[in-house]
Image (cartoon, rainbow, N blue to C red):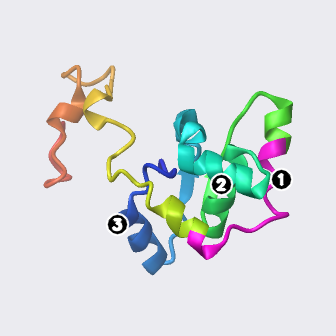
Amino acid sequence: MEFNPTNQERDILTFDQSHGIQLAAWSPLGGGRSLKNPVIEKLADKYHKTAAQIILRWEWQRDLIMVVKSVHEDRIISNSQIFDFELSDEDVQTINQLDEGKRGLWYSDFQWHDPNAKIANAIDHWDDTDPSKPL
């Protein structure tokens, strides 16, 4: 699921951890938005690391799997260099406080399309109270 400093979905993370489910974080850098966060930038200066390395290390220390992508070789290499330092507990807590408590993916904007369905937007007609009920 999407997980980054401003979108932490704490309830889901707590549930997953309590049930032995390993969370895989996609969009771990917040679509690039988190890289410009003043708190992250300050920590990057403190640790002499990039903002991306700070965020990825924070997620690593929270026992998350990060799904990081880039087409730039230098970024791929840089993103892998998070094992030669550790964020202090205080700094981890500082980043934890950046959560805005909002979903990053706006499901109301998401358009599902099933070419075999009789309706154009199946998500508007989803009924998960009765799995036997067809859309």
Above or below, 105 against 98 in this view is above
Q: Residues within 10 Å of mark 1 (few under 14, many from 20)?
A: some
Q: Which comes before the other along the chain, label 1 or label 3?
A: 3
Viewer-side residue, 118 vs 83: 83
Instruction: Kindly state the secondary structure of the residue where label 3 is placed.
Output: helix
Magenta highlight range: 78-90
> Residue 86 magenta-drawn?
yes
Above or below, 129 against 38 in this view is below
Horizontal side of 117 relative to 104 (left or right) equals left
> Residue 126 magenta-drawn?
no
Q: CA distance from mark 1 to mark 2?
A: 16 Å
Q: Which comes before the other along the chain, label 3 or label 2?
A: 3
Please give the residue where the numbered disc 2 appears in the rendered image.
Answer: 43
Any mark on residue 81, and which?
A: 1
Q: Amino acid at mark 3?
A: Asp
Q: Which quadrant: the C terminus?
A: top left
Viewer-side residue, 118 vs 12: 12
**Callout 3–callout 2 Cβ contact below 8 Å:** no
Residue drawn 25% across the image and 32% down it? 108
Horizontal side of 107 relative to 4 (left or right) equals left
Residue drawn 57% across the image and 72% down it? 90
Residue drawn 33% across the image and 24% down it? 113
Please give the residue where the numbered disc 3 appears in the rendered image.
Answer: 11
Above or below, 17 against 107 in this view is below
Q: Amino acid at mark 1?
A: Gln
Image location of residue 66, percent across then percent down: 64, 53
Image location of residue 69, percent across then percent down: 69, 37
Above or below, 75 against 61 in this view is above
Q: Quadrant of residue 117?
A: top left
Q: Nearer the viewer, mark 1 or mark 2?
A: 2
